[in-house]
Amino acid sequence: MRWALVKVCLAVTVMVVVAFAVPLALVVRETARDRAFAGAERQASAVGPALAITRDRRELQRAVAITQAGAEGRIAIHVPDGTVASGNTGGNEGNRGELRVGHTRAPYDRLAAAQRLGRASTVAVDGGYALLRPTAVAGGKVAVVEVFVPDEEVTHGVATSWMVLAGVGIALIIGSVAVADRLGTRMVRPAERLAGAAHDLGEGELDVRVPEEGPTELRSAAVAFNSMADQVVQLLANERELAADLSHRLRTPLTVLRLNAASLGEGDAADQTRAAVAQLEGEVDRIISAVREQRAQSPGAAHSAASDAAEVIRERMAFWSALAEDEGREARVAGVERPVRVPVARGELAAAVDALLGNVFRHTPEGTAFSVDLHSGGPGSEAVIVLVSDAGPGIADPRAALRRGHGAGGPGSTGLGLDIVRRVAESTGGDVRLGRSVLGGTEVRVWLALRNSAARRPATGRRGRRGRRAPRVG
């Protein structure tokens, strides 16, 4: 936008300068020409009184010599019916009885025409112009005073005036470009700050604000942006408070559940129940601590967290295998023999794995087999793939299953389980896909990019149009 303003101002200034400078240059040339011929008229008029009182050659020569043009040999006098004078006549005397004083440059026919018409005229001759001025003399005759005007005098000062005009025009153009550049800078800088602040806000810097300066429109945009940023911060704070409040409300039923579990006595089932209650209490405590934390964590800091996907999957499969054994499910895990680092925090990855396995237990019949596979290409690989497959009935509408909060899983389903998995994958630049597994049921394929955006793939069924409800979703 800045250079566009400069170009527009440059074009307008050049047109204005040309529109004024060209006519002015022509006027200067005509003024110099008129000045030269006006001077020649004055020189011719100075000889007129001498012609009126005498036609003596010596007297006329003396009258011519006392003028500036005559002293320079630029005046000639043509008097009819006089004695032909000897000397330099320029070769135009012929056989007519005519007195001539000075060097003649004009053709004889133009001299005769000037005598006959009695009107001053200008004739182009070698090296300049000849001004022919008729003057009445005694006897009703007409004499002609010829004044030679050289080209140098006709164009005297014209080149200098044109150079001055060109310099003034160039100075105006440079000045207008400089002013346009300053004005463009005043407009562009607030716009650049607004764009940078919007980018920073999108990157998670919630404290970024824009100075309210610049043109009226940009000041209004800055005010609207700052108001929006304040509202975003307030909404996030309200969301954290709501999550903390809901977590606190869970403490009462958790306390009752813990007391009841403590009265179950001894046995494997009682121990597993008490362990589950303790784990649930720990998760609630962590949620409360997280949502109460006021420090806004930048995306770079969040992505710097990493964990061992193989270790997390082994740990969570150990937890879910006990329940799978009770329900008669065959559980298989593969690809977790060696460490596999992924750019996801351990807690977030564990929550995603629990959401996937929880879906299997909630939405497939008892005895349904499932498997968890971890695929990594080793050093230099661009992505890690987590596959969770089951032998259940499958998902009728994958698009609806991937929509947050759609609640397509029937009673007891919030529709947020797969959304948790999707957000974890997208935080690395990956995505989530749903398909048919080799076991005959559903396969959830989670791409975790090791190099941000390097392994990004289009998510199948993401943000599709609303379809009919699926039989299972987390």
Image (cartoon, helix red, strand yellow):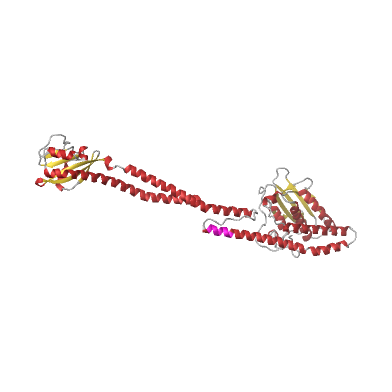
Judge by depth and name the residue closer to the eye, 42 or 136: 42
- Give the quarter of the image for residue 112: top left
Look at 82% across and 53% down and name the residue there.
318
- Can you give x and y, in whole percent of width and height, for residue 363 in the image? 77, 60
Describe residue 36's horizontal placement relative to residue 395 as left or right: left
The stretch of residues the image draws in magenta is: 217-224
- Give the quarter of the image for residue 469: bottom right
Residue 234 sits above or below residue 98 on the image: below
Outermost top residue: 87
Describe residue 46's horizontal placement relative to residue 403 as left or right: left
Residue 223 belongs to magenta span: yes
Magenta stretch mostly in which secondary structure?
helix
Residue 417 sits above or below residue 125 on the image: below
The C terminus, quarter of image: bottom right
Describe residue 149's horizontal placement relative to residue 363 as left or right: left
Residue 127 belongs to magenta span: no
